Amino acid sequence: MSGRPHGDVARLIEIMAALRTPGSGCPWDLAQDFRSIAPYTIEEAYEVADAIERNDLTDLKDELGDLLLQVAFHARMAQEQDAFAFEDVVDAICDKLIRRHPHVFGDVQALDADGVTMQWSAIKAREKAGKQGSPLASLLDGVPLALPALTRALKLQHKASEVGFDWDDAQHVLSKIREETEEVAAELARPGVDASPALEEEIGDLLFVVANLARHAKVDPEQALRGANTKFERRFHHIERRLTEMGRSLEAASLDEMEALWVEAKGAERKPG
């Protein structure tokens, strides 16, 4: 395998086959199946997104390699069952890209970005409806259950909006958020409501509508929440650092002290430079 040309994907396929060869392969790799590997596939996709968020292209190269390994791993297990091989995966995505871009590879007139999105969805729906034994039972079919809940909410809402089931503008969504917040408040006011199914349902409704607001504002809610998480970490690290400088611990600090340091961190972020 050392004589393979640089970047030859066949080398990766051969390495994966060797790892999965009974008797001489890796015991861990041999013990895996589609279900056990799936969580790693999802994790690697998130690590790709994390490298992009940090604008770390060196790390992105490594994380894309890890994600490609996941594709090779699944394809190898499928080949062992005579289902399909890595080459079939490549052929399938090449065919799909050509089929769903008739404005590039066919005779459809030029489209803008929104038109391309609508065309892609329409072609995808026709393909699903045309599969023998797999009629398109619902417009919402095809939104994977395994997606993060926030992302899945966004995709469900987007599909419904394609047929006009949507608010006219973001202001109407804001009104709905206020309504849902009041319903959460009403549940919180009930005695013994902590972690009740009703409270969970109301908070779920609130989160769903917030995702809808993000969609109307053309904001990716996952990315927005990742940004908020990063900001929280940054400001909390400031609290920890300042308390250490003062010779105090988090446990000994009062809420008022920590809040003052939080405001200090927030103010420092607003200063130029």
Image (cartoon, rainbow, N blue to C red):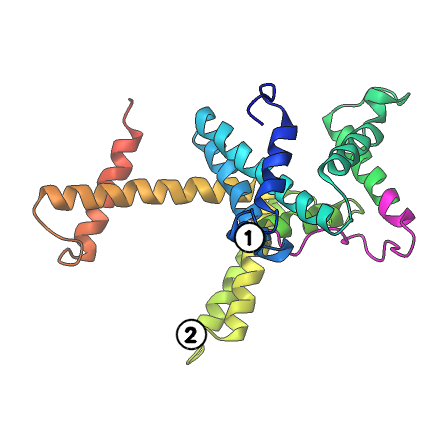
- Residue holding disc 2: 194
Who comes first in sequence, dot 2 or dot 1?
A: 1
174 lies above or below 96: below
Above/below status of 2 relative to 130? above
Instruction: Please check the rendered image and state whether residue 134 is part of the magenta-colored stretch, yes or no.
Output: yes
Nearer to me, 160 or 123? 123
| Quadrant where the image shows the C terminus | top left
**Residue reaching furthest bottom?**
191
Residue furthest front as drawn: 23
Which residue is tagged 1? 39
Considering depth in this image, is 152 or 33 the residue closer to the camera? 33
Predominant secondary structure in magenta?
A: loop
Residue type at mark 1 is Pro
Q: Determine the residue positioned at 74% across, 47% down.
A: 159
Picture coordinates of residue 95, whole percent (x, y): 82, 32
Instruction: Say which quarter of the image contains residue 195.
Output: bottom left
Q: Nearer the viewer, residue 10 or 102?
A: 10
Q: Which residues are the magenta region?
A: 127-148
